[in-house]
Amino acid sequence: MNKKQINNILIWFSAIVLIILIMTPGLWVVLTAFRPQVDVMAKPAVWIPRNLNLIQFETMLFGGSEGSMGRSPIPVLSYLRNSLIISFTSTFIAVLVGTIGGYGFARHNFKHKNKYFLLIMLTRTIPGISLSLPIFIIFSKIGLIDTHIGIILVFVALNIPFTIWLTDGFFRQIPRAMSEVAMTDGCTKLQAFWHIELPLSRSGIASAGIFAFLISWNEYALVSNLARSTDSKTLTVGLMDFTAQFTINWPGMCALAVFIIIPALILTFMVQKHLVTGLTFGGVKG
Amino acid sequence: MRKFLNGPWVLLMPTLIILTCVVLLPLLLSLWTSFTPFKLTKPDTLYRFVGFRNYERLIGDIDFWIAFGRTVLFLAVALNLELVFGLGIALLINKITYGQRTLRTLMMFPMMFSPILVGFQWKYIFNDNIGLMNNFLREFGVIQPIPWLVDGILANTSIMAAEIWSSTSVFAILLLAGLLGIPKDPIEAAKVDGCNSWQVFKNITLPFLMPFVFIAMTIRSLDVARAYDIVQMMTGGGPAKRTELLWTLISRTGYVDAKMGMANAMSYISIFLSIAFTFFFFYKLVEARQRLSYE
């Protein structure tokens, strides 16, 4: 074997180790969701799954079946509904507002532009838990605690800065001359935006939207304090609540975790290409 | 009016209104609250001004400083390791030609996990009774279960492992994007001139990668506080405050002890920490960008 072959083997070996390190923790949780409690608790550990089943999912969605303990103690469907309503609505509003803002930054020069941009980004820096304290006080005064509207409002504010960062980068990739030509041909500015710049940046806006959705879907620090009951608690808060219990039903919790990860998994794979270009373009080309 | 409609402000107005209402005004309220002895149980205390009393107490509060120091240390170690691992992974994937795209996609796996899920999965792995870690060690004869999440040092290391697992890929992906964009000519020229691979890396690859390092750091600095979710899930700051970070301390003081005034004073310190951090890396990014465009 020559030196190059050894090198190749080493590279591939480290790549495989790397993949194992990255994939194992997640896959272990997914596997546990399908295993019976006995196997999970067994000592010595049962490494090769003997029998896999869907009992945890059935219990979670339809309440207990086959004469088990009755209905599932976890109101998963309420959590799921809240998560969906809150994430979709806040994503829609944030993308709408953020895209308009991103266009403003990309197409206009004004005094202190970079400072305003930085200021908007800095609002994202504030730790969720720090922001939750005053919002909790305000919301409990005006009755927005434990409501969808309140949480959606906070999520919109949370997602706008990043949407601006991404869409600003994508709008700047489109040459200004294109809309200028359209405008000399008689388009208004709005028409030029609607017919030329918006379609061209479609993929960028879509990935900004998916980003916003994921951030909302995954958020915990703010929701956990602004939501008080199943009226507005989301899946992440639900997972936390039931994992903090004294005795944890691990397979059940893993099934709930699978519930949270699946939409995120699908969406991230959908945008993975735009994700990298969007992030680096906005950043490097300034 | 016409000028206003054609200018940037009409476009930025919705953004500014929302951010003012949901971020700026609450921050002003929390600034005010930090100068009062406000407790959730006694609403009247919101209007009593006590000056810097909360901050003075914090300065003398040893628990606070331990949590503060632990947070800074935690971030310093975690971010540096993430950067080093991320760079290593990016260089490795860059070397692989066959299957590079697939590897890059697999690399994104941890990015989809919400911090709460990351916390959950590592809590499960490090569980002393049925966790993957102890089950695995038992196969090699370690019968006595290791209390991963109970012992102070082990618990902090476990949380660090979770944090690194979840965030290294951000660095890897962005640095890989940088590596793929490096022009080949200067590297070949340097090799012809007799540079070895370390010299090429140090003098060509690394300077070119610097803006990408700072982008990754800036993006990361925006969400360092999500370590709160992970810690809250894995240990809740305990046992006996052994893994308490600034953010878990704020949450406990504000919501469990209901001392909102004090919690807001703490959160101002945490906000300044975060902002200073982001500001530093953003400034570095702008600087690196300028240097790159001069050359």
Image (cartoon, rainbow, N blue to C red):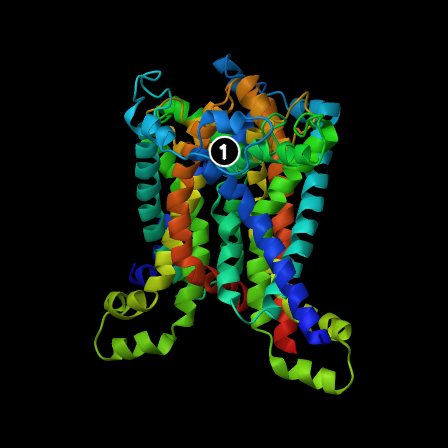
Residue nearer the viewer, B37 or A216: A216
Q: Going 45% across and 59% down the picture, which residue do you hit?
A: A275
Quadrant assignment, res B176: bottom right
Quadrant for the N terminus of chain A in the image: bottom right
Q: Relative to residue A48, is residue B156 drawn left or right?
A: right
The answer to whether residue A31 of the structure is visible from this angle is: yes
Which chain contains the residue that carries disc 1? A
Q: Going 34% across and 17% down the picture, which residue do you hit?
A: A68
List x then y, in percent, for residue A14: 65, 59
Q: Going 43% across and 62% down the picture, which residue do you hit?
A: A274
Decide: is B234 above or below A9: above
Residue nearer the viewer, B253 or A22: A22
List x then y, in percent, for residue B237: 63, 27
**Mark 1 lies on residue:** A221
Amino acid type of the residue tagged 1 in the rendering: Ala
The answer to whether residue B18 of the structure is visible from this angle is: no
Residue nearer the viewer, A7 or B246: A7
Q: Relative to residue B271, is residue A70 drawn left or right?
A: left
Which residue is farthest top? B42
Query: Label 1's element?
Result: helix
Quadrant assignment, res B62: top right
Q: Going 44% across and 44% down the picture, which residue do you hit?
A: A215
Label 1 neighbour load within 10 Å: few <14, some 14-19, many 20+: many
